[in-house]
Image (cartoon, rainbow, N blue to C red):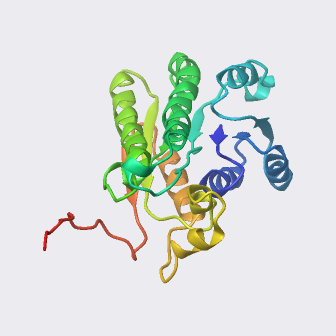
Amino acid sequence: MVTGASSGIGKAIAESLAEHSLRLILVARRQDKLEELQCNLQPKTQSHVIACDITDKNKIKEALKNLPAEFANIDVLINSAGLALGLEPAQKTDWQDWEDMLNVNCLALTHLTRLLLPGMVERNLGHIVNLGSIAGTYPYPGGNVYGATKAFVEQFSLNLKADLLDTAVRVTNIEPGMVGDSEFSLVRFKGDEEKANKVYEGLKPLTPADVAESALWVLKQPAHVNINRIEMMPVSQAPSSLATSRKK
């Protein structure tokens, strides 16, 4: 199961997994984008589409109950759905943006994980791959709640692994830096293409395919190997120094 499968990293991961003929459950809000992806993947693998808002708990539950038999036992969950909204300082942000990020990045991710985890434990087989961010480790101006949600994802991933110690279920958190060729910045700036494009001016960011390659590598490790976390950045990005404020 791949969430956020209609674009960006989620789509790239789905395309990468399809190359290995893995059956896929594709989850995202946009039915048309999912059907387009499903059509493109059809020659390589079977897929099932769930078009809904990942925060709609009842709809997600119902969709999982009604999965076709061949898709019912989910062995891999890729929690790729997530978003950043705004880049204003905390005191000037829109509360709804904060709430939306918390709902998608934290609550929806943990809810879906909780729904699928018992089956993985019962079968003693499974891998949860969460898409975190370097924002969960390195703060930056305007990152406020987005960075906090990704710090949550990192700790949730590590604590999940602690709970799963006596099982064969694996957990990985992949933490990319700047990723281009996606809708991330366009969503952050609410459709402002000029602002979104400026984010990547003069540098070469990671691509969704780069992150998908890491996800595939993690999944292909021997069953006794768990990769706790992967932190990755483009060479044109680095952790920044601590900030100071000096009075004149």
Q: Position of residue 195 (x, y in %)?
A: 57, 70
Q: Is residue 38 left or right of residue 203?
A: right
Q: Is residue 184 above or below residue 127?
A: below
Q: Position of residue 14 (x, y in %)?
A: 67, 50
Which residue is pictured at 68% across the width and 53% down the height?
Answer: 11
Q: Is residue 100 above or below residue 116?
A: below
- In the rendered image, is residue 110 in sight? yes
Instruction: Determine the residue located farthest toward the front in the rendered image.
Output: 248
Q: Position of residue 227 (x, y in %)?
A: 39, 45
Q: Is residue 210 left or right of residue 6?
A: left
Q: Nearer the viewer, residue 140 or 166?
A: 140
Q: Is residue 166 left or right of residue 204?
A: left
- In the rendered image, is residue 227 in sight? no
Q: Position of residue 235 (x, y in %)?
A: 39, 75
How many numbered discs, if any? 0
Which residue is pictured at 65% across the width and 37% down the height?
Answer: 1
Which residue is pictured at 55% across the width and 48% down the height?
Answer: 83
Q: Quadrant of the C terminus?
A: bottom left
Which residue is pictured at 52% across the width and 45% down the height?
Answer: 219
Q: Nearer the viewer, residue 159 or 135?
A: 135
